[in-house]
Amino acid sequence: MTMKIFEEIESEVRSYARSFPRTFTKARGEFMWDGEGNRYLDFLAGAGTLNYGHNNPIFKKALLKYIEEDGITHGLDMQTRAKGEFLEALNDTILKPRGLEYVVQFPGPTGTNAVEAAMKIARNVSGRHNIVTFTNGFHGVSLGALAATGNSHHRDAAGVSLHGTHRMPYDGYLGTGIDTTEYLDKVFSDSSSGINSPAAVIVETVQGEGGINVASLEWLRNLQTVCRKHKVLLIVDDIQAGCGRAGSFFSFEAAGIEPDIITLSKSLSGYGLPFSLVLMRPELDQWKPGEHNGTFRGNNLAFVTAKAAIDHFWSDDKFQLEIQRKGDYVAQRLDGIVAKYGEGNFSTRGRGMFQGINCVNGDIAGKIAKACFAKGLIIETSGADDHVLKFLCPLTTSDDSLKMGLDIVETSVSEVCAKIDKLPEEIVYFESA
Ligand SMILES: *Cc1c(COP(=O)(O)O)cnc(C)c1O
């Protein structure tokens, strides 16, 4: 097999394959290997799908045992032991200790499936069609979810008009010191604002694809207050920020809010298997049997690994403390890199192990990512202009590997910046009051 086969018959739509043009054959923990035996440190981690690293041996053991015993692999949405055990683990270890009471829906296995289901529930239960979404939000690329997604590169490919959503400024969009939930409250209160009372607001607590934009905890609390005041459902899309990435199992825990609906996917299976779910307050579960169906609702192999992930990592607070410790280290290193080479123009952002460097310009961020790859580090960019270097290191990355990866980033930033006369300055559209 040669690399040619990909260019010969695989669609032009491929994307990550272009940034990392190697053929990968093996992966373990925070490392991947290509066919020539070169090792790469993976700070992309399946765009946040491999929070526990590649092929985690504990999950693999549970999975192999299940397969060996001819456990159910596919069973539509029938009751299986694997599903029951996953639900028990989720309820006993994640929901109950947090005082959360939710009904669990298994939509199709991808994130966008969960977002579609969440938006449908909100619309059907409220009898309203409009859904408020935020600037730079990313919620998937099937039509309903795409209408909630901000990025024009993705939106322009829709082929039909996208509707049923209304965009509002995310936290920080109008500059620091402006609380955009006040604007939301105003338009919800004003019958002539031109914005129909929405069914729901859908939000990421930290925008991943949007460029690691972090909503303040206070803003999230204010958002919940505005939603409750106007009887608008609050959907937290925790597909990327959840499962520990932002420092706790749910990304909103630090804010102390209780969303009406939550979507989870990406690292939920723990093993990189396709798996998503929707959590909803019990009174919202007004589905009729089979109304929202799908052949792959509930991936039994993913039930097995997801349960193993919950049992192993979330039964006490050890892992959470580890994430916070490692997140602090990453943040401190990034601050150091930016102070040394960023000429006051680069800046850092993030919460927990969800961190980024805003390089202002996509060309520069892309060059840094490329320089990192040449040194054996897989790292991607995100944001409107792909201007943010995005750190999605597995949460299980060892201290030595974290240091090694950040050293590579530091060298790469210094190399790229040395070749540029003057770094671009961020354009500030709005000055705060
Ligand atoms: C990745 C992502 C999605 C979409 O998930 P897919 O599995 O790619 O469909 C939705 N919302 C957020 C916040 C995401 O990061």
Image (cartoon, grey):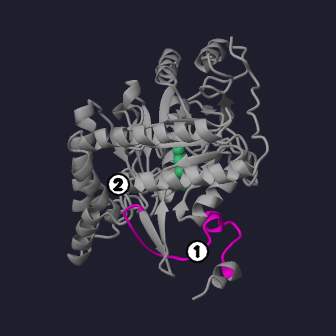
Write the residue at 76% across / 48% down: 420
Callout 2: SS: loop
In the rendered image, the vertical position of residue 15 relative to residue 177, given as above or below: below
Mark 1: amino acid: Arg
Q: Which mark is residue 194?
A: none
**Is residue 207 something that shows in the picture?**
no
Q: Which mark is residue 398?
A: 2
Quadrant of the rendering where the C terminus is positioned:
top right
Write the residue at 38% across / 50% down: 395
Q: Which residues make up the magenta segment?
A: 9-30
Mark 2: amino acid: Ser
Q: Nearer the viewer, mark 1 or mark 2?
A: 2
In the rendered image, the vertical position of residue 360 relative to residue 386, given as above or below: above
Write the residue at 67% across / 42% down: 359
Q: What is the tally of numbered marks visible in this picture?
A: 2
Q: Position of residue 162 (x, y in %)?
A: 71, 44
Callout 1: SS: loop
Mark positioned earlier in the residue sequence (1 or 2): 1
- Quadrant in the picture for residue 370: bottom right
Instruction: Report the residue that reaches farthest toward the right.
Output: 421
In the rendered image, the vertical position of residue 189 relative to residue 155, given as above or below: above
Q: Quick check: is 11 in the magenta stretch?
A: yes
Q: Quick check: is 432 in the magenta stretch?
A: no
Check disc 1 and report the residue beneath it.
Answer: 22
Horizontal side, residue 332 vs residue 347: left or right: left
**Is residue 285 something that shows in the picture?**
yes
Nearest the viewer among 394 and 123 is: 394
